[in-house]
Image (cartoon, coloured by chain):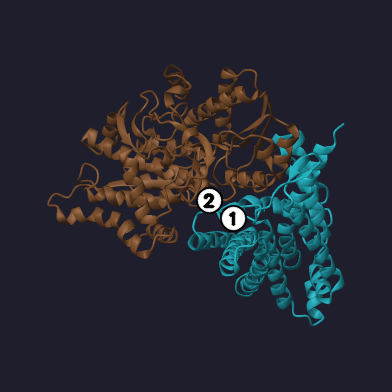
Amino acid sequence: MGTTDRKLEALMEHLRLSRRDFVFGGLAAGALTLTPRFAAAQAAKPYKLGVLLPSTGTGANYMAHCIKGLPVAIAELNKRGGLLGKHPVQMIYRDTETKPDVGAREAKSLILNDKVDGIFGTYSSAVALAVQEIIHEHKVLHFAATSNSSKITQDNYTPYTYQFCPDSNMQSGAVVVAVAKMAKKSNWKTYVSLGQDYEWGRDTHKGFTTGLAKVAPGIKEARQLWFKLGETDFTSYITAIMAAKPDFMFGAVAGKDAQTFMQQAGQMGLFKRVPFPGGLIPVNDLKQQRKTLPRGIIGLARCPFFAHLKEPIMQAYIKRDLAAFGKDDYPDDWACMYYDALGGLEQGAKKAGSISTEAIIKALKGATIDTCRGKRAFRTCSNQLEVPSYVGEVWDSPDYPFPIYKPDTLVYVEAKEVWTPTCEEVEKLKKKRA
Amino acid sequence: MDIAPYLLQLFSGLSRAMVLFLLSAGLSLIFGVMNILNFAHATLWLISGYVTYSLFTFLSEQFGASPWMLLPAIAGAVALMSLAGFALERFLIRHTYERELPEQLLLTFALVLILGDVIKLVWGLENRRINLGVEPMEMFDTLVNPYQFVIIGTGVAVGAGLWYFLHRTRFGKIVRAAVYSRSMVSALGIRIPVIYSMVFALGVGLAALASGVFLPLLPMSLGMDLDIIVQCFAVVVIGGFGSMLGTFVASIIVGVVYSFSILFWPDGALAMIFLILIAVLIWRPWGLFGTELRS
């Protein structure tokens, strides 16, 4: 067992998997991977899957469920024989530390040393853009399911990357739809923006301001406030927002910074004075901030399990995760999207009849796949999965030990409602990169 | 002219300043006395936060949930972390006194990585928070978090306490003497290694106090130590290594300048801090209140 495996084992152990769960869950993936080699007369080549997600840095908190959930999902897939029923999936995990240089280094190591066939990851868009250069150079399949800067599938497009998460433009577009409705109702005129000063924050802000200017040109941005990743004290930002007396605020804030901001802003009463519609509030935050999250606040989510309870894949997924991790440990948005990525890999291989990268990317081009979010197709020009964004009001549900979005306020903003730019424009952006 | 927004910004700047002071005081003390640049200081602060969280949760389960449980939790964490600091100096840091600065930095950076993994293994990846249920209060026609008064009060009390300790107690005077000349202190028959162990324990204890006080404001999360250590170094360099007064004043400068920069020039807020740092390094490389010569 290598160092990486030992580190993963230790990590899994402390992600509250009991030793028994770990042995039957995590190691099942490896064991089942090896079994066919001895059992079958003609041993099929295993599919080596590199997983690049952070267990350190600003993205660690959001990725915890993904990191513990993927081995269990892979073990389940391997019970069916793996890809095409004969290629067991072998997962090799690496920590990106939420840093582009580390992500690129680990991607290179996975490709050159571990000879992976495909890579899942990463959390941060900045890291994903760095990783894309490596996977493009080495022609390795790459499934992104959390990092969602629009550049990943547009300016920095590579045929090897497939995106399972609504991109930053789609998410901003969803917030624009919600804000425009609320602005009309409440006669809002000004707003203040607060964002993380890096690729995703800037891209999300640009998408929102551009989108809002088109649908509600009368609403003006009074101020922009940018903070460095990892900010620990938002007091001065919050007082500056209050001093500007805006009608509402827009936030491009995610990860642990979002939790810190929400906590400090709640304690300072910011949301009592300034509405904050469309801040990213995924299932993690609903669970972790169950006591402090202001009820009635309008949140934005990427793949909340409660929005697709009727989907058979989502039902099975929830059932399996609750059985593996405990009755309250519902999968979060990020884990759900990586589960869809694994499903996409399985379906891509099946459609291609092969596990080769070239065959899978050809098979997935414009293909429709079954996901936790229903049947979804990839946009041909960018390999972006046509998935919705979710906007809704945070509300205490009698069915869960944490708040969810109130069902009658939950809006599914479909991808096609907020596609920006058009496919023609995407083609121009791609040419610009080339 | 409405001065309320400026007063509020000053208030938030002071709150930020005291956060920085509480964190930097131990770092400055350890470097001033022991000449050790402890890169792991913020990591010890972070692990203290997790320890405080665990003690708070345990006490709340045993004796019922109450915000007041934070006080014994902080006291317990300070005691435990001071002991850990004492042991750390005794068995690890002590071996680096005669080494070059890069070697000290490497060792303390290794501690950052090791302690980061310890946090991962013991507490997992999820953020840890304490909710005291504090409600905002109105001030200058806007709302503020009353807990910020606790932060400012604790910062001032710790500053005053450290001043008293260093200037009015025998042990404090020995510590100050060690800043200027450890060989002279040693020649007087005072056991320098014991002084060093206790100073290191005190520095780590201060970090533990800081983390406990911040916990109701700030969820503890992996990697936060590296986010905050740079600003602590800036404070200590501006104030002068080893000078508590310098650390206190530099914290106020950094906190207030940062806060007003957000109001007037948000894009340059962080740059302003480092411009001050550069100016101090050029004008007074030993810091505003540091001393030029030390043996």
Q: Colour of chain A?
A: brown
Which residue is the site of mark 2? A288
- Residue A226 in the image: state x and y as whole percent: 65, 36
At which x and y percent is residue B5?
80, 37
Q: Nearer the viewer, residue A151 or A59?
A: A59
Query: Which amino acid type corresponds to the residue marked 1 in the rendered image?
Result: Arg
Mark 1 neighbour class, 10 Å CA radius: few under 14, some 14 to 19, many 20 or more:
many
Please give the chain letter of the residue carrying mark 2: A
User: Measured along the vertical axis of the image, is residue B244 above or below residue B13?
Assistant: below
Q: Is residue A41 above or below residue A100?
A: below
**Mark 2 element type:** helix
Q: Is residue A369 left or right of residue B173?
A: left
Identity, as a three-letter code, of the amino acid under mark 2? Gln
The image position of residue B27, as x and y in percent, is 71, 61
Q: Which residue is mark 1?
A: B129
Q: Secondary structure at mark 1?
A: loop
Q: Residue furthest front?
A: A398
Closer-to-camera residue (B276/B150): B150
Where in the figure is residue B138, as x and y percent of width and height?
Answer: 77, 44
| Residue B295 in the figure: left or right of residue A201 | right
Q: Tell me the residue at 23%/51% (across/down).
A: A79
Residue nearer the viewer, B226 or B191: B226
Crowding near the residue tagged with mark 2, few <14, some 14–19, many ≥20 C-alpha atoms within 10 Å: some
- Frontmost residue, B282 versus A372: A372
Q: Is residue A370 visible?
A: yes
| Chain represented in cyan | B
Which chain does tag 1 point to?
B
Verify CB contact (< 8 Å) between mark 1 and mark 2: yes
Q: Which residue is located at x 82 percent, y 41 percent? A: B7
Residue furthest out toward the left: A41
Residue located 42% across and 49% down the image: A330
Quadrant of the frame with the N terminus of chain B: top right
